[in-house]
Image (spheres, coloured by chain):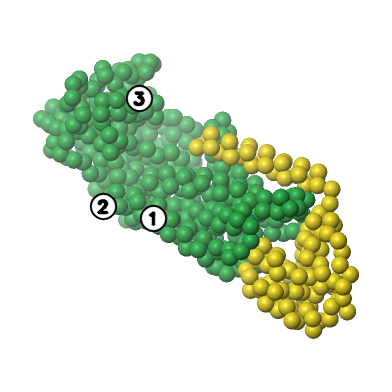
Chain colours: A green, B yellow
Amino acid sequence: MRDLAKLSVPILVLSFVAALVFWAYPDGGAPARQIGIMLGWAGCGMLLASLVLVLREPRLAALLGGLENMYAWHHRLGMTAYIMLLAHPLLLAGASLPKAPREAWELLSPFSESWPVWTGWLSLLLLMSGLGATFAPRLRYQIRRPVHAALAVAVLAGLVHLVLLGIDEPVTPILVISSALLAWRFIREDWGIGASPYVVRSVARVSPNTVEVSLAPLGEAIAAKPGQFALIAFQSTRRFKGCREFHPFTVSSVDGVSGFRIAVKALGDCTRNIQAVEPGVPARVQGAFGEFLAESTPAPQYWIAGGVGITPFLSLLRAGKVDRSTTLIYLYRSETDALFVDELGAIAATQPKLTLLLRATGDGPIDPESVLPAGKEIGKGEFWLCGPPPMTKTFAHFLRTRGVTYRRMHFENFGPL
Amino acid sequence: MRKIYLISTVVFWILVGGFWLAGLSAPKTLAETETPVQKGYTLTDVAAHATPNNCWMAIHGKVYDVTAYLPDHPSRPEIIETWCGREASLAYDTKTKGRRHSETADRLLEGYFIGELK
């Protein structure tokens, strides 16, 4: 069922794009022109589908295989659409190139006196800069995020380009739907109108740079399960400066109708601010999302956590007993970075099927062989990994060499949403 | 993905530069190299070519056989095909609200010129 939900995105996108290309298939003209037109429509269809995939609605996410799956497809579709839309004007102009090179350039040239050409170029340049910002890690987040959001304008400019070419059917309704989707994302989700109101109930410091924040609902509580994450925007008060935007945090404890807890490590500007959060600070919450630890097989379970990546495992342990053979390997740089170790020890003492392995790794890279059992035993296991990307990458590579398939490896993986 | 983005963007701009150079080095457009035909037609002659497979149009006193161009026109086929066999100056001058076709379109059109309107 989960696999089917994950396939729902490519199936739906493929159907939508195929329908658009079928409708717009040109009857005649040079082959380069025909391919150019089809690529333009296919790229347009993929961008429209990627707009649906940025909606952060729990029910929609459950239907489409989870928010991580939606975002992975959002990125894949965006990149594929970009390449297709780059090829689109080149092929249209290329169709005239052998016979009339000057006319080919005039068709492509942004200096042509033509609104359809200008809006086409505007759309392409916005796509280029929006994607460029995504791939520029040195660019400050405060700049990168709005430039990435300019991709929304690129989609609208592309649709206006089509309307100006006289293709108002079915583009006009698509333009209306796209504007509605963007408004939904920006007003309901980025501004938090659709989010649930919460308040900080208590704050506990668990390490010099990590706090555990308990949140209580002011209205209807979100339905969070262990292993899931929520998008949270802490609001500013007189004494506390909120981040003004939603950040993903893994739930560290599900407290039923009375709320949930999250562990926040100071890793960036926003999470540094949250270290000073106080009881009474209002917050808006969207979610919960994610399927990490949701379904496991009867195979021996290996939970591999690094640093603050312990939170999804902690939330599951806090929720109840461990009913199958489970080894929790918790890695941290030094004792001061270790979170909840006393509580983990206390839980392990009461759970006969849980084996707890704590390991301070120091600054160097971790050798997976030093913490995983030798022999063929691990080939039968199921692995759940949550931690810094270099750590999870090292373990995934090692597990592959020991015959563990990616199907039996699960990652908690979410970036900026 | 970053690598794909960089490669595709660089290739795109190289090809755009290639089109620019090819356009710059081409001495004359297709229209300019064609030998002008000085034949005259009436609107009745034009009206005899009113199908997408045989499409003439009269625009600003000149007659064009745009049959070969129809599949290349960017808009929906019905938009241009309704003007086959007719005096189409008004349509040509009002592509978008109050805005005529571009100079590029003018040059493109010249390639399909077959005679003067009598």
Q: Residue at x 52, y 44 (%)?
A: A79
Q: Residue at x 84, y 78 (%)?
A: B41
For residue A1, the mark is: 2
What kind of residue is marked 3?
Answer: Thr
Looking at marks 3 and 2 on the same chain, the residue that comes earlier in the sequence is marked by 2
Q: Position of residue A93 (x, y in %)?
A: 68, 52
The residue carrying pointer 2 sits among few (fewer than 14), some (14 to 19) or many (20 or more) residues within 10 Å by Cα, namely few
Mark 1 secondary-structure assignment? helix
The residue under label 3 is A394
Quarter occupied by the C terminus of chain A: top left
The answer to whether residue A1 shows anywhere in this view is yes
Q: Position of residue A366 (x, y in %)?
A: 33, 19
Mark 3 secondary-structure assignment? helix
The answer to whether residue A344 shows anywhere in this view is no
Q: Position of residue A56 (x, y in %)?
A: 41, 52
Chain letter belonging to callout 2: A
What kind of residue is marked 2?
Answer: Met
Looking at marks 1 and 3 on the same chain, the residue that comes earlier in the sequence is marked by 1
Mark 2 secondary-structure assignment? loop
